[in-house]
Image (cartoon, grey):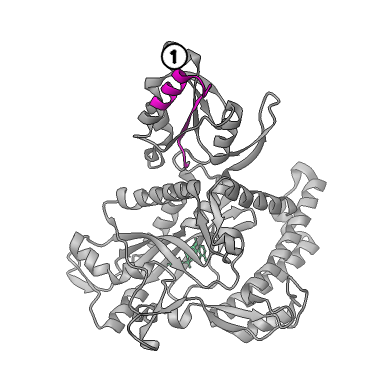
Amino acid sequence: MAQQTDLFKNLIAHCKEYGFIFQSSEVYDGLSAVYDYGPYGVELKNNIKSYWWSSMVQMHDNIVGIDAAIFMHPKTWKASGHVDAFNDPLIDNKDSKKRYRADVLIEEQMEKIEAKIDKEIEKARKRFGDGFDEAMYRTTNPRVMGYVEAFEAIRTRLAAAMTNGDMAELKQIIEDLEIADPESGSRNWTDVRQFNLMFSTQLGNIAGEEGKLYLRPETAQGIFVNFLNVQKTTRQKIPFGIAQIGKAFRNEIVARQFIFRMREFEQMEMQFFIRPGDQKHWYDYWKQARMKWHLALGTPQSKLRFHDHDNLAHYADAAVDVQFEFPFGFKELEGIHSRTDFDLGNHQELSGKKLQYFDPELQESYVPYVVETSIGVDRMFLAMMSNALVEEEVPGGEGSRAVLKLHPALAPVKCAILPLKRNEERIVKVAQDIFHKLKLSFNVQYDDTGSIGKLYRRQDAIGTPFCVTVDFDSLEDNTVTLRDRDTLQQERVHISQLEGIIRERVDMKQLFV
Ligand code: GAP
């Protein structure tokens, strides 16, 4: 655990040191849970968005994109259920004056029990060696069985309390488990109450409640209210999807873990409109398709898993998370939700405008059902960074290096061009010629600000898959040294081959085949 905490701290420090992520308004000591992306951060983020967008819009002739406004008519949020039901259970500690999510306090207690189970299993594995049967041990060892039983009892109570919106029961669980404020140790809690997560602001020319606007807490509603506009203008037939990437805002009570839980973040959402009754088929389809998308990036299967929701969001009849193993454990990276006709049906009712589709095959009109895939750009960014950052010894006694083994298609810079001697005009000229040629195709960098060793380390730290070194031999035979970030292998290649070799490795195309 301590090792994982260090890993996470290193990652945050790395993000700052190498220009990936800065705390927002840092000169004023920062704004909690709001972050700015630096020069390499924005490149990685754009590449993640581009991979998602291409896989949805370019790769499917029945998915189209939109870019809706952040502000929407206030009735949108009434119809969507966010005004009444987009709440988290809030609890204050009367002594420390700290505010917590009641469900998170309980979940953290459950994680402690899980850690105890893991510890027992590890101990037994060491004791019994190769013949250890974990499944059998879990169901026969009295101590482990006791922990599992305690865990399941809490899980069941928590799920029921959350589903029923039973705030008194949440408080009771906290009291029964004797949960203390993690910071002060105090058990002096207020009652649990619902806290709406939407940020609100005021429209310029209308006073009072009438002019109350919300910053969208999900991008999906911009898609729902445009459903017919898009369907009619693109003549799509069901099943079809609408994709969107954009900012969302949530007044999170507990905003920690760096960019994992932010108050301003970005989502990539796709609503897939289907015939009522087909939801199970499309839910399974998108579950598999989204897992494939993650695995194509080389993320190990062991770091990804599905997790069915215990308590469903107010709009869903089935929901699953794709969880990723972040440095602080398996957590939600993406959600796949079967939203039925909840949103379109409610918008139709509140607006009084028909939001129906005429199905030419069935010769009837209906409100389509929707299966949604929704992933946070920032969470995907964090997943990719934590999967990629490695501290390793360089062979040949050259010390250690921090290297970001990002998939080349996501890497912020694809190739660095480095002259062996910055004072040797002929070498500099060849290097700059290569830079000007390659920049037409990729994001490349020219760098002559240090020794080659130092320049390599810097490019490793930002995840550049290739470095090209121009030396005296280059002047004779038009070849350069091409260094591979991961294998550290160096090969001599002709300058005319560079573009082709780099393209083959960094092209997003390889992720789709
Ligand atoms: N339209 C459905 C929806 O918004 P969600 O599970 O609340 O569903 C979808 O959010 C995804 O958005 C999450 O899986 C996560 O990746 C991202 N997300 C949600 N809240 C976030 C936050 N406070 N900070 C960063 N990302 C967040």
Residue 277 in view, yes or no? no
In this rendered view, identify the residue nearer to me: 495 or 122: 495
- Using the rendered view, name the quadrant where residue 28 is placed: bottom right
Quadrant of the frame with the C terminus: top left
In this rendered view, identify the residue nearer to me: 166 or 498: 498
Q: Is residue 66 above or below residue 101?
A: above
* Residue 414 part of the magenta segment: yes
Q: Which residue is mark 1?
A: 475
Q: Residue furthest top?
A: 476
CA neighbours of label 1 inside 10 A, class few (<14), some (14 to 19), many (20+): some
Quadrant of the frame with the N terminus: bottom right
Q: Is residue 3 left or right of residue 421?
A: right
Q: Is residue 117 left or right of residue 20?
A: right
Looking at numbered disc 1 in the image, what kind of residue is underneath it?
Leu
* Residue 224 part of the magenta segment: no
Q: Determine the residue positioned at 70% across, 30% down.
A: 399
- Give, as a single range, the part of the protein colored magenta: 412-433
Q: Determine the residue positioned at 80% across, 51% down.
A: 123
